[in-house]
Image (tube, rainbow, N blue to C red):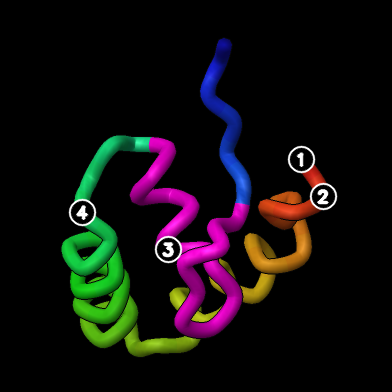
Amino acid sequence: MSKKLQRSSNKMVAGVCAGIAEYLGLDVTLVRVLYVLISIFSAGFPGLLIYIILWFVMPDYYEVL
């Protein structure tokens, strides 16, 4: 069975960071902290824009089942 990049049911906002963490096999908290740090150091807007794009592009956990 191959891994698929999808939003997770472990959601704080939309499940994007949790989905990326599950796909890469990393801790969810680590991915969320890295996302916040990258967003802050890149002036915030690009990180927010990427998150919103991924929110709409990544399939939801329940759509894949």
Left or right: residue 32 compared with residue 8 = left
Q: Are marks 1 and 3 in contact (CB under 8 Å)?
A: no
Which mark is first along the chain, 4 or 1?
A: 4
Q: Distance between the residues labelled 2 and 1?
A: 6 Å
Task: Decide: is 20 above or below 17.
Answer: above
- Inspect the image, locate mark 2, and give the three-letter code of the amino acid beneath it: Glu
How far is disc 4 from disc 3 in space, using C-alphas? 10 Å
Tell me what residue is drawn at x 20 percent, y 54 percent. 27
Identity of the amino acid at label 1?
Answer: Leu
Q: Earlier in the sequence, mark 2 or mark 4?
A: 4
Residue at the spot of label 3: 17
Q: Nearer the viewer, residue 22 or 45?
A: 22
Q: What SS does tag 1 mark?
A: loop
Label annotation for residue 20: none
Residue under label 1, please give it: 65
- Mark found first going from the N terminus, 4 or 3: 3
Left or right of 34 in this view: 15? right
Residue lying at 64% horizontally and 61% vertically, measured from the top left: 54
Name the residue carrying label 2: 63
The amino acid at mark 3 is Cys
Q: Is residue 42 above or below residue 58?
A: below
Front one among 33 and 39: 33
The image shows residue 58 at horizontal and vertical percentages of 69, 52
Q: Where is residue 25 in the image (x, y as percent from the top left)?
A: 28, 37
Q: Where is residue 57 in the image (x, y as percent from the top left)?
A: 75, 55
28 magenta-colored: no
Q: Residue at x 75, y 50 (%)?
A: 59
Of residue 41 and residue 1, the one placed in the foreground of this image is: 1
The region drawn magenta spans 7-23
- Give the vertical position of 26 relative to 47 (above or below): above
Which residue is the extreme one toward the top?
1
Disc 4 target residue:
27
